[in-house]
Image: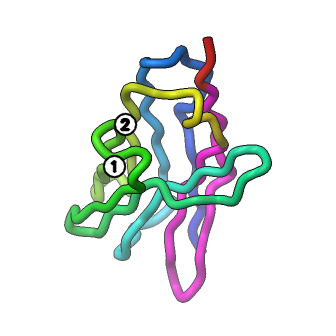
Amino acid sequence: QVQLVESGGGLVQPGGSLRLSCAASRSIFAAMGWYRQAPGKQRELVARITRVGSTNYADSVKGRFTISRDNGKNTVYLQMNSLKPEDTAVYYCNAPWGGDEYWGQGTQVTVSS
């Protein structure tokens, strides 16, 4: 089994920046991703990154968010710049391991004036 722990969420003003981290309890050899869910909306994929660094992003965050990973630290990051109110959501880290899917507990990101 593997545990995923997110951190870095908080309250920021529009246009601000935030960096999320997700630490895994063991090495992940597959792609990892960040998802988010806002009240009244379905959970959506925000960004994904493979073991070797290939990435993809939701259209709504392209050019503003950057996903990266440090395999030596078993950690994936999400750098969020130029934040907008519509980015407000609970952000979750996801990773497959041993035939199962694992999720972090989630971290709240609120963008408001």
Q: Which residue is drawn at 42% across and 32% down?
A: 19
The tally of labels here is 2
Amino acid, disc 1: Ile
Mark 2: secondary structure: strand
Cβ atoms under marks 1 and 2 closer than 8 Å: yes
Is residue 99 one of those drawn in magenta? yes
Is residue 62 one of those drawn in magenta? no
Which residue is denoted by mark 2 in the rendering? 79
Tag shown at residue 67: 1
Q: Where is residue 59 in the image (x, y as percent from the top left)?
A: 39, 53
Structural distance between the alpha carbons of marks 1 and 2? 6 Å
The stretch in magenta equals 90-110
Q: Residue at x 54, y 14 (%)?
A: 13
Q: Which residue is drawn at 63% across and 27% down?
A: 110
- Tell me if 65 is positioned left or right of 112 in this view: left
Q: Position of residue 101 (x, y in %)?
A: 59, 76
Q: Which residue lies furthest to the bottom in this view?
A: 99
Q: Residue furthest right?
A: 40
Residue 108 found in image quarter: top right
Amino acid, disc 2: Gln
Q: Position of residue 73 (x, y in %)?
A: 34, 51
Q: Residue at x 65, y 40 (%)?
A: 89
